[in-house]
Amino acid sequence: MADGTLSIKRTITVRAVVTPRWKEDAERELSNAVSNTDAQLAQLEQEGQQLIDEIRRQSANPLDPRVQDQVGSVQQQVAAKRAELEEQKRQILEQQRQVRDLEMEQIVEQGQLESTVEVRVGDNLVEKLQAAVLVRDGVVEAIEGAL
């Protein structure tokens, strides 16, 4: 800062041009996410049932209200996690639908990166903080905004 400049962090928006390859990659990634969510749901159900069976097996009286409370608690936890995973899956399926509806050459936001930028007295901070990178199939096509 001795020279009158300051280095600050900024967020850079990554925009992608929709191409057949981009669509294929996005759909594959989302299909994998659906499969992973389905696997998590199956594992959740299995582990929940094993835990319930174990609680009942270790109890002298499976009909004891305390045992029933424990089982109910496990069932509630499993149901809450199931609802969370099902919502996650619903969102992924919605993203898949949106990707399928995209037109070729359309520009979509793909994510964000962080970088630093030098600012000095007299700079327009808003302009310095606005930056984006445009990519086509992973290759940078344009850099938008102040460097």
Image (cartoon, rainbow, N blue to C red):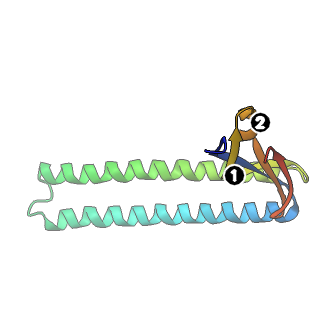
Rendering coords of residue 37 (x, y %) = 54, 60
Element carrying mark 1: strand
Q: Which type of secondary structure does the marked residue at label 2 adopt?
A: helix
Circle 1 is placed at which residue position?
Answer: 111
Residue 8 is left or right of residue 130, and the answer is left
- Residue in the picture at 88% in, 48% down: 106
Residue 22 location, quadrant: bottom right
Please state which amino acid type lies under the numbered disc 1: Gly
Instruction: Give the residue displayed 33% in from the left and 48% down from the top.
Output: 76
Q: Residue furthest right?
A: 105
* Relative depth, front residue between 109 and 130: 130
In percent of the image, x 61 and y 45: which residue is there?
2
Residues 45 and 138: in front is 138
Circle 1 residues within 10 Å: few <14, some 14–19, many ≥20: few
Categorize mark 2 by other alpha carbons within 10 Å: few (<14), some (14-19), many (20+): few
Residue 34, horizontal then vertical, whole percent: 61, 61
Residue 62, quarter of the rendered image: bottom left
Q: CA distance from mark 2 to mark 1?
A: 20 Å
> Given the current orientation, which residue lies at the most extreme left position?
60
Tag 2–tag 1 contact (CB < 8 Å):
no
Up-down: is 128 above or below 39?
Answer: above
Tell me: 109 left or right of 139: left
Q: Residue at x 16, y 54 (%)?
A: 67
